[in-house]
Amino acid sequence: MIYVKQFKLLKEEQESYVSGSDPRKIYVSYYPLGIFSFKRFYKIEFENITIFYGGNGSGKTTLLNIISQKLNATRKSSIDKGNYFDIYVGYCQYEMTREKPNEIKRITSDDIFDYLLDIRSINKHVNRRKEEIGKDYVDYKYSLNSNAISIEDYEQIKNANEARKKTMSSFIRNRLTNNNIIEQSNGESALMFWEKEITENSVYILDEPENSLSAENQIKLKQFIEESSRFYNCQFIISTHSPFLLGLKDAKIYDLDEIPVKDKKWSELKNVKIYYDFFKENEKDFE
């Protein structure tokens, strides 16, 4: 499903007007002026999945920041802005289709890292609780006062009976509501993050979502994005240099390393060709 149809960046004459709007000329940095006009990249035509590819410094993240700011996308992490950023964004133009998305959300690799840190913190808490409950298990099982008869002792008697009937692991497991989190790797937790964040009929602006994921899990994320686009009417705008995500089915890919910027097939991209040549050169090792 396409919600964001088109986006227009500033041309040289527009950027000259923006920089000339400050008569004091006190700013050292003119970011993001000159980045995309230098690449002669003025108009973006979006598909269900649109990818911005390029090396470090190519402007991938800057472009996503500009688009998400203009579309007023919700976000968790802040955007690094220069003195002219908001002015630049103000002059950009975009076109939506008649279909209205439920939400427009920008998600960065920092958001994923923060989520993994939260999970790690929960795991530490769970491990502490496991130790505490394990000690309780031993106390209940071997230190019951047989003469206890008060109402206050009823809970102790009940816990002691349960401890005697169960192993320590089952006793602990029944008292931990989020114990399953401990069993998940970082990659599995990252995939769970995407499952929780992506909802139907929405636009998602993803900045290098492959971070923290192994090759196997990148392929799983690729399949998840394809299914979300096809079956849940989601539109994705992605920056990546992952060869797996660059292979997203029917994605439109803009090569930001080219001047002028062009849309290409994923198999034409330099990064993908490097992988291909390497494995082709060592093909006999896989026989």
Image: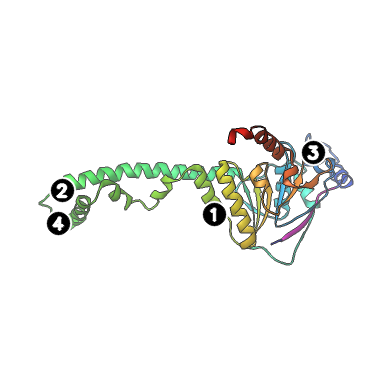
Q: Are marks 3 and 1 in contact (CB under 8 Å)?
A: no
What stretch of residues is rendered in magenta? 3-10
Q: Given the image, on which type of amino acid does mark 1 rest?
A: Glu
Q: Mark 2 vs mark 1: give the one in front.
A: 1
Please tell me the numbered disc located at residue 150. 4
Q: Is the magenta stretch mostly helix, strand or loop?
A: strand
Which numbered disc, 2 or 1, marks the residue that appears first in the sequence? 2
Q: Mark 4 vs mark 2: give the one in front.
A: 2
**Callout 2 secondary element:** loop
Please tell me the numbered disc located at residue 195. 1
Q: Residue at the spot x=59%, y=45% of the render? A: 218
Which numbered disc, 3 or 2, marks the residue that appears first in the sequence? 3
C-alpha separation, residue under disc 4 versus residue under disc 1: 49 Å
**Looking at this view, is 160 or 88 the one in front?**
160
**Magenta span includes 150:** no
C-alpha separation, residue under disc 4 versus residue under disc 2: 13 Å
Q: Residue at the spot x=21%, y=52% of the render? A: 165
User: Image height check: is 154 above or below 14?
Assistant: below
Which residue was labeled with disc 2?
Answer: 144
Please tell me the numbered disc located at residue 129. none
C-alpha separation, residue under disc 2 versus residue under disc 1: 46 Å
Which residue was labeled with disc 3?
Answer: 30
Q: Given the image, on which type of amino acid does mark 4 rest?
A: Ser
C-alpha separation, residue under disc 3 versus residue under disc 1: 38 Å
